[in-house]
Image: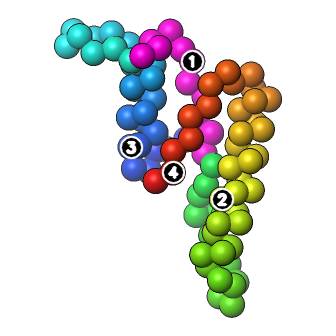
Amino acid sequence: LTDCDGHGTLVAGLIAGQPGPDGFSGVAPASRILSIRQTSARNAPSDPGEDPVLTRATLETRTLARAIVRAADMDARVITISAV
């Protein structure tokens, strides 16, 4: 899993960052991070006649719901969602 813009890595560090010599520590350093990609270029509209905004919103809602269900199925107790 690659973090295309660094946002997920930054958020994961804020949550589960291990204590370092600079004194920084995440808010829950003993937590386990489960990364699930919700969107990708594969979900982009493929029919040039489709309204890309409407199609993208529909796909994002569907894939977001699937990602939440997957996280819950994997026993996630806290889910954070970021839209960038």
Q: Residue farthest to the bottom? A: 49
Q: Which residues are magenta?
A: 27-37
Locate residue 77, reporting x and y percent.
67, 21
Res. 32 mark:
1
* Residue 62 vertical position relative to residue 53 in the rendered view, above or below: above
Q: Nearer the viewer, mark 1 or mark 2?
A: 2
How far apart in space, not on screen, are marks 2 and 4 (Cα)?
10 Å
The amino acid pointed to by label 2 is: Glu
Assign the magenta stretch its main secondary structure. Answer: loop
Locate residue 81, reporting x and y percent.
56, 41
Res. 6 mark:
3
Q: Which mark is first along the chain, 3 or 1?
A: 3
Tell whether label 1 touches label 4 (CB within 8 Å). no
Which residue is tagged 4?
83
How far apart in space, not on screen, are marks 3 and 2 (Cα)?
20 Å
The amino acid pointed to by label 1 is: Arg
Q: Residue farthest to the left? A: 22
